[in-house]
Image: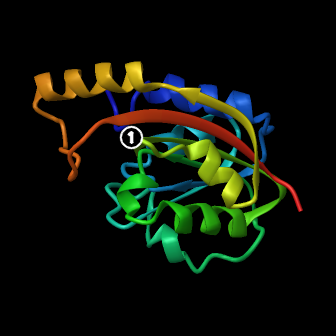
């Protein structure tokens, strides 16, 4: 079990759904331990990971809300379980949009407070949504297992949540 619902299989599913080809340059926003960076490199992609608190040498220290990375340099961006905890989902979308090349893909899965919709937020940031999937059932299973193992990190808010996956295209 790794740091997000579905683990490596989910990351690979998102990559496949994006249509990005090996050799593409991808950024992992909120890379944590760098597991996805390693996984994607093994598949032939050029990958960088950024996180406020990197937990391996695979990941650079930095705030993805104001990364300082150049505009339009990535073919793809992946983020799993990070936009919501950043504290500013719209700013995360704007920064992802800024860093993607025209035609670039955003692969996102995250927790959403009830009433929020990642697809709508992606569209508001200028993305074309290619796929939107509710994965709440998988998230609940993941979280219950994490509680059982004693590895769950509590969400700092109360209320109901959903877990959504979105694949987006940057068009200019």
Q: Left or right? Give the position of 69 relative to 51.
A: right
Above or below, 125 relative to 122: below
Q: Quadrant of the N terminus?
A: top left
Q: Which residue is mark 1?
A: 114
Residue placed at 60% from the left, 60% from the top? 93
Residue placed at 75% from the left, 59% from the top? 126
Q: How is the image coloured?
A: rainbow
Q: Nearer the viewer, residue 36 or 144?
A: 144
Q: Position of residue 16 (x, y in %)?
A: 71, 28
Q: Position of residue 36 (x, y in %)?
A: 50, 41
Above or below, 111 relative to 29: above
Above or below, 31 relative to 140: below
Q: Is residue 52 visible?
A: yes
Q: Quadrant of the C terminus?
A: bottom right
Q: Left or right? Give the position of 52 relative to 102.
A: left
Q: Position of residue 127 (x, y in %)?
A: 75, 53
Q: Position of residue 159 (x, y in %)?
A: 24, 41
Q: Is residue 77 visible?
A: no
Q: Nearer the viewer, residue 167 or 77?
A: 167
Residue placed at 79% from the left, 34% from the top? 19
Helix, strand or loop at mark 1: loop
Residue placed at 78% from the left, 45% from the top? 23
Q: Left or right? Give the position of 2 relative to 16.
A: left
């Amino acid at each position: 079990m790794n740091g997000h619902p579905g683990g490596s299989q989910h990351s690979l599913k998102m990559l496949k759904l994006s249509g990005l080809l090996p050799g593409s340059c991808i950024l992992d926003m909120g890379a944590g331990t760098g597991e996805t960076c390693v996984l994607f490199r093994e598949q032939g992609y050029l990958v960088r990971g950024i996180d406020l608190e990197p937990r391996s040498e695979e990941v650079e220290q930095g705030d993805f809300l104001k990364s300082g990375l150049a505009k339009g340099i990535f073919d793809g961006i992946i983020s799993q379980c990070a936009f919501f905890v950043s504290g500013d989902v719209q700013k995360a979308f704007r920064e992802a949009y800024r860093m993607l090349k025209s035609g670039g893909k955003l692969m996102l899965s995250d927790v959403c407070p009830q009433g929020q919709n990642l697809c709508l937020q992606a569209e508001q940031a200028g993305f074309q949504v290619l796929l939107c999937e509710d994965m709440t059932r998988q998230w609940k299973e993941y979280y219950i297992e994490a509680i059982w193992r004693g590895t769950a990190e509590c969400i700092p808010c109360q209320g109901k949540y959903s877990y959504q996956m979105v694949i987006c295209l940057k068009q200019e």
